Image (cartoon, grey):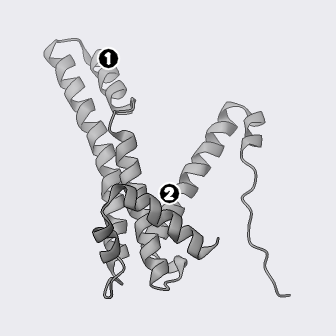
Amino acid sequence: MALDGWQETVAGRATDYITDRTWHKLFTRGRSRLCGALAELAAETLATKTKMHNAVGSIAAWFARRLRAGRLAEAVARELAENLPLPLDAKFTAVARGVQLTGIAVCLANGRDLTECPCFIDLALNETKERVKQILAAAVDDWVKLANFPALSRPETTGG
């Protein structure tokens, strides 16, 4: 990945949504621990999305109980409310990913190795888990769909 090009692209996107002043403050001295805080914020943002779904499910189940709809109807209402996408889902995810990318940019600007960047580590682990889930779901459904998941390219190793 071309470091300068990547940072410029991220900076261009970030400043579409945050002020130039805030963006520039990210890159002042003494921000070595900022990425850890950003990684924690991103993780909490994603967790809040799950908590929101659980709360909506609890409210739906409460209404079903109040209407004396029965345990099965209550379970249906709870599960639908917990699992259907909410209007804010995409925004929560976009904010979390944007925070992670900002943290990665800060680490790169500080010369930090990405294998030590909390935001990069969280993003890589989450994306890897998601990809594994997608592959397993495809395997359960129809193995022909496994063709949609080619091997990710790996850097060539040298040595002998």
Taking the spot 32% from the left edge, 17% from the top edge, the residue there is 72
- In the rendered image, residue 61, in percent from the top left (x then y), is placed at 23, 24
Q: Is residue 107 above or below residue 132?
A: below
Left/right of residue 134 with respect to residue 87 in the rendered view: right
Q: CA distance from mark 2 to mark 1?
A: 34 Å
Taking the spot 24% from the left edge, 14% from the top edge, the residue there is 70
| Residue for badge 2 | 126
Give, as a three-letter code, the residue at label 2: Asn
| Residue for badge 1 | 72
Q: Is residue 122 visible?
A: no
Q: Nearer the viewer, residue 75 or 14?
A: 14
- In the rendered image, residue 19, in percent from the top left (x then y), is placed at 30, 63
Crowd around label 1: few <14 · some 14–19 · many ≥20 (10 Å): few
Mark number displayed over residue 142: none
Q: Is residue 51 visible?
A: yes
Furthest toward the right, the residue is 160
Left/right of residue 154 with respect to residue 37 in the rendered view: right
Q: Is residue 27 above or below residue 69?
A: below
What quarter of the picture does the N terminus occupy? bottom right
Q: Residue 23, located in which quarter of the rendered image?
A: bottom left
What quarter of the picture does the C terminus occupy? bottom right
Taking the spot 41% from the left edge, 58% from the top edge, the residue there is 98
Q: Nearer the viewer, residue 33 or 66?
A: 33
Crowd around label 2: few <14 · some 14–19 · many ≥20 (10 Å): few
Q: Secondary structure at mark 1?
A: helix
Give, as a three-letter code, the residue at label 1: Leu
In the rendered structure, which disc, 2 or 1, sits on the residue that comes first in sequence? 1
Q: Are marks 2 and 1 in contact (CB under 8 Å)?
A: no
- In the rendered image, residue 124, in percent from the top left (x then y), is placed at 54, 63
Q: Secondary structure at mark 2?
A: helix
- In the rendered image, residue 51, in percent from the top left (x then y), is placed at 28, 44
- The mark closer to the camera, 2 or 1, is 2
